[in-house]
Amino acid sequence: MNWFSPLIGIAGGLGLFIFGMQMCSESLQKMTTQRLKQLTKLLTRYPGMGLGIGTLVAFGLQSSSATTALVVGFVSAGLIPLAQALEVLLGSYIGASLTVQIIVFRTADLALILIFVGSLLYMFSKRMKRRSLGQAILGLGLIFFGTIVMSSSTESWRDNPAISQLLIALRNYPVLEFVVGIVVTAVFQSSTAFLALLMTLGSHRLVDVYAIIPFVLGAHLGATLTGLLSSWGAPGLDSKRAAYANFGFKLINGVLFLPFYRPLTEVIRWSSGDINHQIANAYTLFSLVMAIGFLPVVPRVAALMERILPEKYPDLAEARLLKDDLLQVPELAVDQAHRQTVEMGQILYENMMQPVLPIFKYLNEEAIGRIRETEKAMDTLYKKIANFLAGLGSNRLTDDLMQQTIKILYTANDLEHIGDVLVGIVQIVSKMDQEELHFSEEGFEELTQMFQQIQNNFALALQAFETEDKALATRVIQEHPRILRLEKAFRYNHFDRMQSGNPKTMATSSAYLDLIEFLLRIDGHSVNIAQGVLGIV
């Protein structure tokens, strides 16, 4: 018997199937980026909606594994709370089962029609939405056609006694079937792809009916491994909590029901006389059981995961809101980069700008050390934001998104420069302390007044950037001339004190004028941020 040709057919058909799923997923993401963003907001407003939203998203993405990876990214990015994320994951089980139900009704004629229609829309439509729709239809056609190729390739195995006996013998080893389902699903990164292959073998009577339950339970568990692996490299603990809880749901499901696979098989046999429908029905049954069974205890599970994985002291240089998985959805990725830049500004304000003024009067080496460490974190965060946005690629962005990325990069760069300036200020104050120099009372009061002015203006600029408030941005720009006049007045006062022979003023003249200049530079960067909000970049 020629084993090679059927294997090539299975590999090719499986490749078409997985490629079709990827095409569907990418096209639907392009068509629904704004709605995905709105759905994540609904989760935080209306707890309990996660089940329905997870069903829709998983059905749209044609994969619970893809949904798991996406939800893990959303949680680590702070888009949705952990409890709501677990609801979405439970809903994704149902959505994936709907995809499996659709695959059962594949026909060669329908597959070819979908490929033809999808190709026409994708190749000849000028509108992006129609092209994306065509890509989705084409992908669905490839999914159906891939299963047909696999089915025709394995037909020659049906009458081979060695293969038949080997596969049917597995009915005596349900744990082995369970493990095979886990491993193959993890390799394919899709339970749907594994079940399609299982249906192909089943249609030629190469899979015993008593193997369905163990294989399906294994496929459920194997589908969680993609999200589990992606959580290991994700910043923040919530992503790991979501992935581990998702794994726990399906592990409990497998361990609980595997010993009863024979009576459960009789239920599945009663649901349909066709083995393909039996496989799909088994997958749907366990998806519903998990969703209904675990939904009431989701808040407790979330609390338990928080106790198992408690929060640690945050790393200021950690870009916790930036997830590479979100690059597949440009609008969400840009929104997260905006939020990360706001957080960068808040870290700068709380850990660098606020501690600086007390150092003017009471030198604190520990505070100076924290300021310098925070400045290094500013450099790292700027690089991470820039690299993250570079990963989007200009060809995937609309004009509005491209403009938004430029504003974000400008602002992040200004924040990084402000950090450099604040370190320069600290260095001047440290040098004065070493030389035992002190400002005059008038000079110190002037520096304090000007620092407070630029600090307030920076806070307004950051708020304007966060909320995209053009009125606030205008206030920042209007405040700048007042600060310039203040600087001129203080410079004049300083020179007047020098002419009067004030010894402290004369000794600290260079430091005073350098500090005035540094404070002006900070306000200049605040104005740049405000101009970005107004579209002046």
Image: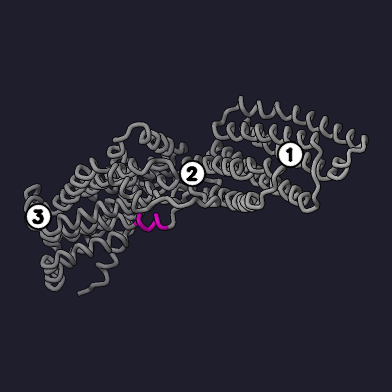
Which picture quadrant has residue 454?
Answer: top right
Which picture quadrant has residue 15?
Answer: bottom left
Q: Answer with left or right where residue 457 lies relative to residue 104.
A: right
Residue type, mark 1 in image: Leu
Q: Which of 190 and 51 is in front in this view?
A: 51
Query: Marks 2 and 1, Cα distance to the nearest angstrom?
Result: 34 Å
Q: How far across and how far down the image is residue 253, in percent?
A: 20, 53
- Sequence-wise, the earlier of marks 1 and 3 is 3
Specify start and end residues of the magenta stretch as a single range.
226-232
Kindly report which numbered mark, 1 or 3, lies closer to the viewer in this rendering: 1
Q: How far across and how far down the image is residue 518, in percent?
A: 75, 42
- Sequence-wise, the earlier of marks 2 and 1 is 2
Tag shown at residue 265 = 3
The secondary element bearing badge 3 is classed as: helix
Give the quarter of the figure containing the N terminus.
Answer: bottom left
Q: Answer with left or right where residue 156 lies relative to residue 11.
A: left
* Other-residue count near label 2 (Cα within 10 Å), few / some / many at <14 / 14–19 / ≥20: many
Camera sees residue 371: yes
Picture residue at 20% right of the left edge, 62% below the top: 178
Which picture quadrant has residue 161?
Answer: bottom left
Tag shown at residue 528 = none
Q: How far across and how far down the image is residue 155, in percent?
A: 18, 63
The secondary element bearing badge 2 is classed as: helix
Can you say whether 30 is above or below 2 in the image? above
**Tag 1 residue:** 519
**Tag 2 residue:** 333
Q: How far across and how far down the image is residue 397, in percent?
A: 52, 42
Query: Marks 1 and 3, Cα distance to the nearest angstrom?
Result: 75 Å
Can you say whether 143 is above or below 468 in the image? below
